[in-house]
Amino acid sequence: MWTIIHKMGSPPWFFRFSGGLVKWLLPLTVCLLLVGAVWGLLIAPPDFRQGNSYRIIYIHVPSAVVALAGYYVMAFAGAVSLVWRIKMADVTMRAVAPVGAALTAIALVTGAIWGKPTWGTWWVWDARITSMLILLFLYLGVVALFEAYENKSAAARACAVLTLVGTVNIPIIYKSVDWWYSLHQPASIKFTGESAIDPSMLYPLLLMIGAFYCLFAVTVLLNMRAELAWNHRDASWLKQLVQGT
Amino acid sequence: MPASESNLTLHGAFARQFSRHARAIIRSPAEVANPLLFFFMVITLFPLGLGPDPQRLAEMAPGILWVVALLSSLMVSGKLFASDYEDGSLEQLAIAPFPLAVLALGEVSAYWLATGFLLALASPIFALMLGLPATGIFTLMVSLLLGTTCLTLIGAVGSALTVSIRRGGMLLSLLIIPLNVPVLIFGTTAVSEAVMGGNATSWLALMGALALGSLAVMPVAIGAALRVSLDQ
Amino acid sequence: MPLLTASDVTIERGDRRLLADVNLTVSAGEIWQLVGANGVGKTSLMRALAGLARLGVEGQIERQAELLYLGHASALKPSLNAMENLRCHPACDVMASDDDIERALAAVSLAGHEERPVGALSAGQQRRVALARLLVSSARLWLLDEPFTALDSSGCDWLDEQIQQHVEAGGGLIFTSHQPSRFGSRQIDLELARFAC
Amino acid sequence: MYFESLAALWDMDGHGIYVWLAYLLTLCPIIVMVWLPIKRFRQHWRWIEAESRRSGIDVGGAAGESAR
C-alpha cells in the first residue's frame, strides 16, 4: 500500500499514469453521458405527477451527488497534503475545486429550471436547493482563497485547513437546512424525494450518476496534467517526454 | 543569566495571553464600542426599510436580530489577528513552547468577551426596539451567548486564514458566512419558538452542542491556519 | 550537547532556490554570525531555524533547547506599557515577577518609562524593551535577527555584554548583523551557500 | 422511444422548453470543463517544446521566469 502512495506522489509517474488513464476514460465518459441522456430523455417514461419536466432529474441529481462527493475528495486531498506534505495532493485539491464549483452550479441551475414548471417560480427555497447554494459558496470560498495567496504551496495548505473545517460543517449545514425547511414549510412533496423510483427511471439515473463520476474524474485528471505540465516545465523528465514523443 | 527555570504552566500561558488582549482591548474602547454601534445602527435600518408596523417587525424580530448579530461578528473577526500579525507577536506566539491552539484560544476568548458577550448582554435593548415579545428576550440572550461563541471561533479561523492577505476582509466573509449558517438557523428558530411559547430548550441545547463542538475543533484549525499564514 | 542542529537545509523562494545545503550545529558556549548581502536569505534562514518557515524548506532542523527568537518586529502591543508587554509576552517561557521586569528595564536604561504605553516610546526605546526580554527568559538558544539595528552605541555595548554573559552561562546564539563581527563568533558566509542561479 | 414524433419530443407536453434548456445549460459547462484544461495543457506542452528547441542546451534555473 505504501509504495502506491509513494508512487502516486511522484509527478513523473503520475503524469504518465494519468496520460494513459485519460486516453480511454474521456471517450468512455462521453459515451456514458450520451447513452444516459438519450435513455433519460427519450426512452424513460415521464413522472405521473410532474410530467416530462421530471426528466431534468437525470442531470440535476447526478451533478448534485458528485458535487458533494467532490468536496469530500478535496477534503481528503487537503488532509493528505497537510499531514504528509505530498505536493501531488496540493495539485489535486487545486484541480478539484473549480470542477466541484461548476458541478454545484449545474445542479443549482437545473434545480431552478425544474422548479419553474413544478412550482411556477424560478427560485424556490427548497431544502436541497438551499444546501446546494451553501455548498457553492463553500467551493467559491476555497477557489477565492487559493487565488488570494501568492505563494501557491501556502495557498494549498490554507485551502486544506478551510476544506477540513468545511467538511466538519457540511453535515451540520445540511441537517440544519432540512430542519429549517421542514419547520417553515409543511412537508409538501420533497423535491428529490427518496420516494421509491420506478426501475424504468432508476436505471438511467444510476447510469447518469456513473457518467458524472467519470466526468468528474476526467476533468480533475486533465486539470492536474495541465497544472503539472506548468509546474514542472523546467524539469528534465518532462523535457525528455516532450522531445521523446 | 536567564532568570529562572521555566515555571510557566499551560493555563498560565493561556491566562497570560487572555490578559494581554483583554488589556489591549480595554485600552482601545473603540474596539468594544464598534460592534455595538454597528448593531444599533443596522437594527434601526430595518424599520426604515420594512415599515414601522410593530406587528410585522415583532414577527420578523428574531430573524433580524440574528442576521445582524452574524454581520457584526463578521465585521469584528476581520481585525482579530491583524494587529498581532503586523507587530510580530503572532510570530512569537508560534514559537512559544505551548500549543498554538491554546494560546490562540486565549486571544479569541478575550475578543469574544469584548464583542459577543457584550452583544448578548445588550441584546434586550435591541429586542425591545423591534418589539420582540418579552417571552423571547431571555432565550435571545442565551442563544446569543452560545451563538456568538461559535461565530467568534469560526470568524477566528477565517481571520487566521486571511491575515496575511492584504485586502482579506471581503474574502473573509465569503469564507465564513456558509459556515455560520447553522448557528443562524438554530438561533432564529430558538427565539421564534420561545416567542410562540413552544419549547426553545431543544434548540438551545443544539446551540450548546455546536458551541462546545466549535470550542473543541476550531482552535486546532486556528492554530494550523496561523502557521500557514506565518509561513508566507 | 548541541542546542540546534541543521543538516543540509535548502530554502526556496517561489521557484528560485535561495540557499542550498546549509549545515550548522550550535552547541553551548558558541556564537554564530550569519554574514551575507541583503536578500541573500539571512532572515529566511533564521525563520527556518526558528521553525517559523516550513514551506520551501528542506533538510533537518532540530532544536534541543528552549528558543528565544527576536525578529525585525519587536512584538510589542503599542497600547500596553513596557511592564505589561514584558509580563505577558507571548513567547516568554517564564512567569517573570514584577521586580525581575523592573530590573530588566532598568538594565536597558528605561527606568523611568515603565508606565508609558510602548507606542509613545521612540523606535530605539521600543527596541530596548524588546531586548529586555533577553534578561527575563530562561531560553538557552537565542536567534537574534539584526539585534543591533536602531540601537545607539551604549545599547550595542550592553547587548555585547549580554551575549558574552549568556554564552558563558552555557547558552548558544545565532545572530545576523551588518557590523563586522564584534567578538570571536564563528561566521557562516551565506554567499558560499547561495545556489548558483 | 416514448414520444411518437420529433415534434412531440421537442414539445414534451409543454415542458420541452424547460427540459431542453436545462440540458443545454448542463452541456455547455461540461464542454468548457473538459476543453479548458486540454487547451491549457496543449499550450504548456507547446511552450516546453519551443523552450527546449530554442535553448537546445539545457539552460538551468529560472529560464521560464519571463513566461510566467
Image: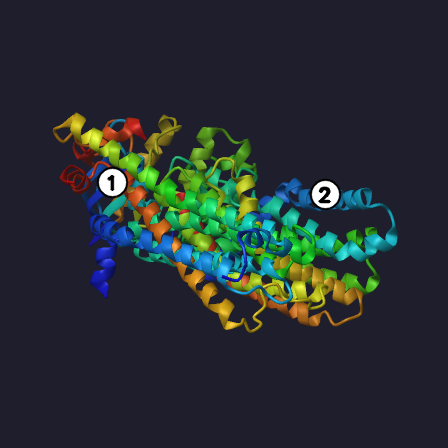
Q: Are marks 1 and 2 on the same chain?
A: no
As displayed, is residue B139 above or below residue B18? below
Q: Residue furthest bottom?
A: A196
Residue D50, how many percent across, how many down?
21, 29
Residue to which mark 1 is pinned: A232
Q: Residue at x 38, y 45 (%)?
A: D34
The answer for which chain carries disc 2 is: B
User: What is the residue that sits farthest to the left in this orientation?
Assistant: D57
The residue closer to the viewer here, A124 or D57, is: A124
Q: How is the image coloured?
A: rainbow
Secondary structure type for disc 1: loop
Name the side, left or right, on which B165 lies relative to C116: left
Query: Disc 2 marks which residue?
Result: B37
Q: Quadrant of the N terminus of chain C?
A: bottom left
Using the rendered image of the protein, determine whether residue C51 is visible from the camera's viewpoint.
no
The kind of residue tagged 2 is Leu
Amino acid type, residue under disc 1 in the picture = His
Residue A39 appears at what percent x and percent y? 46, 61
Question: Looking at the image, which residue is at 24% across and 48% down?
Answer: A15
A231 or C182: nearer the eye? A231
Q: Nearer the viewer, residue D40 or B17?
A: D40
